[in-house]
Image (tube, rainbow, N blue to C red):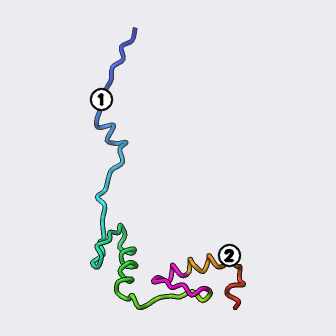
Amino acid sequence: MFAVMRIDNDDCRSDFRRKMRPKCEFICKYCQRRFTKPYNLMIHERTHKSPEITYSCEVCGKYFKQRDNLRQHRNLHMDTCGRGCFGK
């Protein structure tokens, strides 16, 4: 008969484990919201610095603080109405 022996080798296991990096956090100085990327923090902090700047939809009049959000919203009009909404 054959004997089965278990070999515990922690060195082999450590090669297969994913190495965890400490998470970098960027914190908003106005509301303490946390972000993992500095670019996202920069975009967020713009909403605190200039709340009077808004972007409005020409079709329905809805207001947005960020231009990218307005751009996404416009796509909804395109999907719903086609180009007819913007042809007014």
**How far across and how far down the image is residue 7, in percent?**
31, 26
**Left or right: 50 in relation to 83:** left
Q: Amino acid at mark 2?
A: Thr
**How far across and how far down the image is residue 57, in percent?**
57, 86
Q: Amino acid at mark 1?
A: Asp
Determine the residue located farthest toward the top in the rendered image. 1
Specify the quadrant of the image occupied by residue 31. bottom left
> Mark 1 sits on what residue?
8
Q: Residue at coordinates 51% horizontally, 78% vertically from top-left?
A: 69
Q: Residue at coordinates 30% horizontally, 64% vertically from top-left?
A: 24
Crowd band around label 1 with a 10 angstrom C-alpha radius: few (<14), some (14–19), many (20+): few
Depth check: give the residue in front, 46 or 18. Answer: 46
- Placement of 81 over or under 16, stated as above or below: below
Crowd band around label 2 with a 10 angstrom C-alpha radius: few (<14), some (14–19), many (20+): few
Q: Was residue 5 drawn as part of the magenta stretch in this picture?
A: no
**Left or right: 84 in relation to 30:** right
> Mark 2 sits on what residue?
80
**How far across and how far down the image is residue 52, in percent?**
41, 91
Image quarter hosting the C terminus: bottom right
